[in-house]
Image (cartoon, helix red, strand yellow):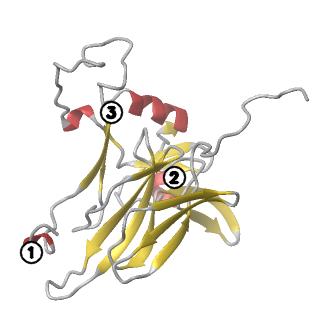
Amino acid sequence: YLDASDKSNTDQQYMFGVKDPFYNKDPTNSTYYHKYTTSREVALTDLFNSDPYLILNNGEVYLDSDSDGLLDYSTEYVSATPYGNWSQLLTAARLEDGWIRSLIISGERIVTKFTILGGIVFTPSFDPDADICGYGGESYLYGQYYETGTAYWDAALDTYEIKIGDVVLVTQMLDKTSIGSGMASSVGVHVGAEGSKGFIQTSSGTIIEQELETATDVKSGLRSWREK
């Protein structure tokens, strides 16, 4: 914390993904691309609001009417019209200058740097103990597609299944998972033959190993065939 009052602060917190117009060339507007003498201020209204979108593993997208981050079967799935599919969501997000995502828990904040791997942004967050005289708190890990700020349809930190008996009716891809007590460090990444893993150390001294699913390949390989 920067100040003692930060511990009890419950202001709404956000995370942002912003396109840098200096490096991202817009084919219809080159005002900012590689121009050192121009500047631009991005307003919140210029950003894609990623809060209401619930992503299913088949690429369908629904809207979160009660802002709890989970698909309600009766009101948000059965009785509601879906927003569309992943392609439509991606197209809408690309029209904006980046994205903004609200942190749902009151007092939750981000105090470490983001880690980007294979198109997914991995971000630890921290929710301090509500007792001003207490210590510690709970940490979470976000994994969001870098262009939308939402979960990705084919990679998730966790899933949420709606079942009738043993039959899974729908599977939601979640972009957030709990990593337990203590304040988490940023994510250290290891990519090997067994896949991608993240390593996070909490303030309690515990080291957490987390499997990391990504949207794109993270290792080099052949792009086409070759004759031997």
**In this picture, residue 85 sits left or right of residue 109:** right
Point out the tag, 3 or 1, that comes first from the N-terminus.
Answer: 1
The residue at the far front in this view is 228
Amino acid on which the number 1 mark rests in the picture? Ala
> Does residue 79 show up?
no
- The label shown at residue 172 is none
Asked which quadrant contains residue 67, the reply is bottom left
Point out the tag, 2 or 3, that comes first from the N-terminus.
Answer: 3
Asked which quadrant contains residue 220, the reply is top right
Compared with 25, 174 (above or below) is: below
Compared with 178, 92 (above or below) is: above
Asked which quadrant contains residue 29, the reply is top left
> Does residue 201 show up?
yes
Q: Position of residue 160 (x, y in %)?
A: 54, 63
Say which residue label 1 marks: 4
In terms of secondary structure, where does tag 2 sit?
helix
The residue closer to the viewer here, 101 or 133, is 133
Say which residue label 2 marks: 77
**In this picture, residue 86 sits left or right of residue 114:** right
Say which residue label 3 marks: 19
Amino acid on which the number 3 mark rests in the picture? Lys
